[in-house]
Image (cartoon, rainbow, N blue to C red):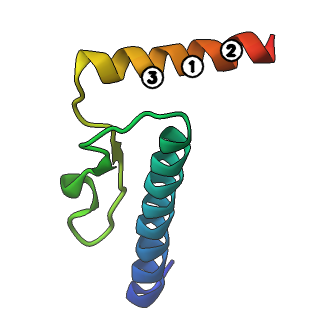
Amino acid sequence: MMTATERRKEAAGRVRAAEDAVERLRAGLAGVGVKLPSLRIDPVSFAGDEPNPLVDLGRCSVETALRLSVQLEAAAAHDS
């Protein structure tokens, strides 16, 4: 059984991992000219004693969605 301190450290690690994921995704998208303005960690998912953070990709314009689709299609074609 984990102590409260161990649970807090584990939870903090999950939050840090989610923050890192958001930053990596933001940087990767910026590298291909795509910006998701609402990209963030979902605040509700990391509330409480034992957070399980989720990455919220948020809302974007149709133009941004199409730019992202083009980049994903190009990456998929490159991997084939």
- Is there CB contact under 8 Å for labels 1 and 3? yes
Query: At 24% from the left edge and 43% from the top edge, which residue is drawn?
Result: 38
Mark 1, residue position: 72
Q: Is residue 69 above or below residue 64?
A: above
Occupied quadrant, residue 80: top right
> Which residue is nearer to you in this view: 50 or 58?
58
Mark 2, residue position: 76
Gap between marks 1 and 2 measured at Cα: 6 Å
Measuring from the top left, give residue 30's x and y in whole percent: 48, 43
Which mark sits nearer the N-terminus, 3 or 2? 3
The secondary element bearing badge 3 is classed as helix
- Is there CB contact under 8 Å for labels 1 and 2? yes
Amino acid type, label 3 = Leu
Q: Is residue 12 above or below residue 61?
A: below
Amino acid type, label 2 = Ala
Measuring from the top left, give residue 53's x and y in whole percent: 35, 55
Occupied quadrant, residue 31: top right
